[in-house]
Amino acid sequence: MNPLLAIENLRVTFPTAKGPVDVVKGISFTLGRERLGVVGESGSGKSMTGRAILRLIRAPGRVTADRLDFDGTDILARTERQMRGIRGARISMVMQDPKFSLNPVMTIGAQIAEALQVHTPMGRPETRARVLSMLESVRINDPERVVRLYPHEVSGGMGQRIMIAMMLIPEPDLLIADEPTSALDVSVQAQVLDIIDEQIRRKGMGLMFISHDLDLVSRYCDRIVVMSAGRIVETCAAGDLHNARHPYTQGLLAAMPRLDERRTELPVLDRASWGGT
C-alpha cells in the first residue's frame, strides 16, 4: 500500500547575514494511516517540518525536496490556489497553544462553520447540525451555548477542544498536531489526546504528532522519528523507544526526571560523543 505522505530530502532554508542556513537538513520519511510521533529539542526542526508539508513557510524561507508527495499529489508542484484546496480539507494542522489561533472577534460556532463551508458548502441548517455534532464529538457539553461564545469566554482546555473540532470538521486525511496539549494540565491533556485518538481511529486518518514529551509519544504513537539540529537521527517503533541506540535519543531519555528520582542532578547531552551541533 502506498504511504499517505512520502518525503525525500526535505530542506527548509533561510537567508542570514552569513549565508543560507538549513533549519531542516535533508530529512526523509513516510507516513501511512498511522500515528507518527516526531520528537526532539526546541529548534530541532519539528514544527518547520510540519509547516513545510503544508507549504506554510513564507519568503524569504525556501522549501525544497526530491519528493514531497501527499496521497499521490506533488505538494511542491501545486499552486497557492490549489494548496488552499488541500489545507484543511485534506491536511489539517493544530498549532501550538491552539486556543490562541482562534479569532477573538468571531463566535466559536461561526469559526467552526467557516472551516467547514470553505471546503464543503452547504445550507445553514445542515452546517449548524454538523458544527453541533462536532462539538459533541470532542466532548463539549451544551454545544448550543458554546457556539454563541467568544474565545475569551472559554477555558484553555475547552479552547483546545474547539480548535481540534475546527481542524477535524472537514474530515481531513492527515492531521498534524504540533504540541496540541503543551499548555494543559495532565488530566485535561489526557482527555484531549483521547479525543484526537478517537477521531483518528474512527475516520482512518494519519497523524503526525509533534512533541517534546518522549513518554507521552511512546504511549500514544505507533512509530517515532527523533530529530536533532534539523536531521532525523533515529526512527523506531514506539514500543522500542526505551531501547534506542542513538546517543542523542539515549541522552534525551536519560535526562527525563522520574517519580522515584534519586540522582542529585540530571545528565546533559554529550554532543561530542555523536557529532551533534
Image (tube, helix red, strand yellow):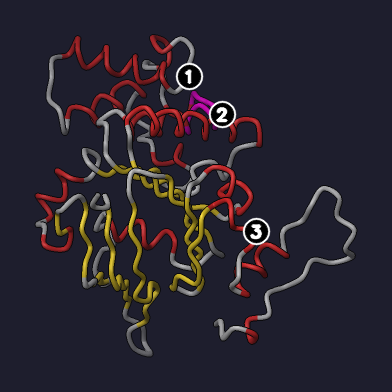
Of callouts 1 and 3, the N-terminal one: 1
* Secondary structure found at label 1: loop
Q: Quadrant of the C terminus?
A: bottom right
| Prevailing secondary structure class for the magenta stretch in the rendered image | helix
Q: Tag 2, which secondary structure?
A: helix
Q: Which residue is mark 1?
A: 139
Q: Which residue is mark 2?
A: 191
Give amino acid for label 2. Gln
Looking at the rendered structure, which numbered label has been put on residue 69? Answer: none
Q: Which residue is mark 3?
A: 242
| Element marked by disc 3 | helix
Q: Is residue 88 left or right of residue 185?
A: left
- The quadrant where residue 18 appears: bottom left
Camera-side residue: 16 or 2?
2
Task: From the viewer's perspective, tell me whether residue 131 is left or right of residue 272.
Answer: left
Are the residues flagged by discs 1 and 2 in contact, CB closer than 8 Å? yes
Does label 3 or label 2 sit earlier along the sequence? Answer: 2
Q: Find the magenta span and give its range.
A: 153-160
Callout 3, which amino acid?
Answer: His
* Front of the two marks 1 and 3: 3
How far apart marks 1 and 3 lie (CA) works out to 33 Å
Image coordinates for residue 101, horizontal then vertical, percent:
39, 41
Magenta stretch: residue 99 in it?
no
Name the residue at 43% across, 45% down.
35
Disc 3 or disc 2, which is closer to the eye? 3
Q: Position of residue 122 (x, y in %)?
A: 13, 19
